Image (spheres, rainbow, N blue to C red):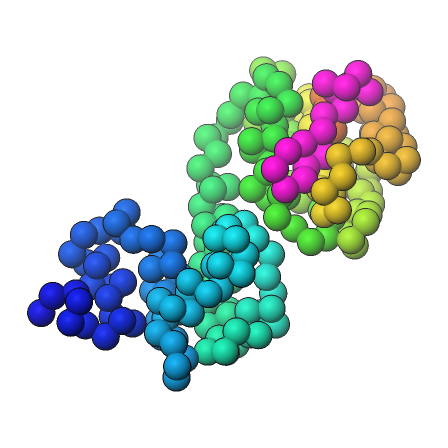
Amino acid sequence: MTIKFLAEDDRPREKFLLKGKSSLSDSELLAIIMGSGSKNESALELARKILSSVNNSWHQLSLLSNKDLMKFKGIGEVKAVSIIAALEIGKRRAVQEIPEKAVISNSNDAYCILKNQLSDLRTEEFWAVFLNQSNKVIHISQLTQGGISQSIVDVRILFKTALDHFSTGIIIAHNHPSGSLKPSKEDISITKKIDEAGKTLSIQLLDHIIITHDTYFSFSDEGLL
């Protein structure tokens, strides 16, 4: 039986088996995750509708909540959770692809390591990258989760983590869900506080990165460190 004679819900899976995963379109991949459509739409038609609503962007799709997805007829709680879980797997895979003891030589290196954790969040999070004397990454840690406009870090926890890993350098980072790259007064204040504390412990604050959806701001590049 050829693909064209199959029920439309079965066609993406059959295509996957016959031609491989790379042959599938985004909507076909999403249809496989959902498994079935609604009474009036196939999984493929529903997948196209969902992707169209987010301009065919996986990033924008990852921002949708269970409730957002369940607004589409044919998407119940189970399918919504399946979609979100699949996107989270992709995010975690990207994190695991960071080479062990990667070397950070500039702000873009730090951004590339942290963007998968911070670029698509709706609330602020504060992360830190801990480095050795050769600027090799020895540990990455999420320190806080905050609200829409602010995430406060405990400087004591930051430096305890640095000491626990024998780190000599730190890069801190947080996201701005608003999309603004401009540092707030709080951002500037906490950067100075961490910088001063680091000098006392001989642990250098190398940079503070603010991350938005598709770009970043570096305190070091802008001469603020």
Quadrant of the image for the C terminus?
Answer: top right
- Is any part of residue 108 visible from this angle? yes
Q: Is residue 14 above or below residue 104?
A: below
Q: Magenta segment, principal secondary structure?
A: loop
| Residue numbers of the magenta segment | 210-225
Q: Is residue 61 above or below residue 65?
A: above
Q: Quadrant of residue 180?
A: top right
Residue 171 place in picture, x, y as percent: 69, 28
Residue 182 place in picture, x, y as percent: 80, 33
Asked if residue 14 is among those painted magenta in the image, a careful observer would answer no
Quadrant of the image for the N terminus?
Answer: bottom left
Q: Quadrant of residue 5?
A: bottom left
Residue at the (58%, 21%) spot, across then down: 104
| Lateral position of residue 190 relative to residue 94, left or right | right
Residue at the (57%, 74%) spot, across then down: 71
Q: Spot the residue most to the bottom.
A: 39
Residue 89 place in picture, x, y as percent: 46, 54
Residue 21 place in picture, x, y as percent: 27, 51
Q: Is residue 17 above or below residue 42?
A: above
Q: Quadrant of residue 31?
A: bottom left
**Total number of numbered discs in the rendering:** 0
